Image: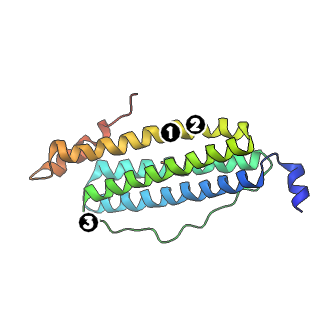
Amino acid sequence: MKDLVRMRTSLSEEVQNILNEQIRIEAVASAKYLAMASWCDERGYENSANFFYHQSDEERKHMLKIFHYVADMGGKAASPEVAGINHEFASLREVFETALEQEIGVTHAINRIVDTCRKVKDFGTEQFIDWFVEEQREEEFVARRIIELFDVIGEEGQGLYFIDKEIPNVKYDA
Ligand code: FEO
């Protein structure tokens, strides 16, 4: 069986495993963002909710991008199990801080894929994963910038209203 798989795909077992792990990570990220969207929606933070609905869609697209890559390379892409998604947050700020922590975690996971690719000399997969390296720069930037809004605008009085209002204007323009 193992030999048959080797004939069908040029992906090493190590690379295929780490890509399937990334598929799971992206699926979890999508589910977490959906929970964050729900939390914001319920409390009337409309722009924040839309931001997280959009992010949830983006993470699913990331998952599928890797899923199709593994399948297109003749590998075995695995549909991941997602469970235990947190729906409880103490504040809007905590929601965005959790989002940033999550993105930093994803960046580390992507870096581990690059590292594995270099170790086994899988330059094709390294080239494919480059897109994600750039994407992570953008996603971390946006999450960080939004958290800065909490300090710049302040959370007192109508602060949270104005922070929410400002969310769609946060863009990565590097
Ligand atoms: Fe697909 Fe935000 O990591």
As drawn, is 14 to the left or to the right of 25? right
Camera-nearest residue between 120 and 10: 120
Circles 2, 3 touching at the beta carbon (< 8 Å): no
Q: Is residue 62 visible?
A: no
Q: Is residue 127 above or below residue 1?
A: above
Q: Position of residue 156 (x, y in %)?
A: 10, 53
**Type of amino acid at the residue the image marks with label 2:** Trp
Counting other residues with Cα less than 10 Å from the Cα at mark 1, is it few (<14), some (14-19), or many (20 or more)?
some
Circles 3, 1 touching at the beta carbon (< 8 Å): no
Kindly identify the residue that appears in the image at 56 percent across and 45 percent down. 111
Q: Give the spatial CA distance, label 1 vs label 2.
A: 6 Å
Asked where in the image residue 132 lies, by quadrant, the reply is top right
**Quadrant of the drawing holding the N terminus:** bottom right
The local secondary structure at tag 3 comes to loop
Q: Position of residue 59 (x, y in %)?
A: 51, 50
Q: Which residue is mark 3?
A: 90
Q: Which residue is mark 2?
A: 131
Q: Which residue is mark 1?
A: 135
Kindly identify the residue that appears in the image at 86 percent across and 55 percent down. 5
**Type of amino acid at the residue the image marks with label 1:** Glu
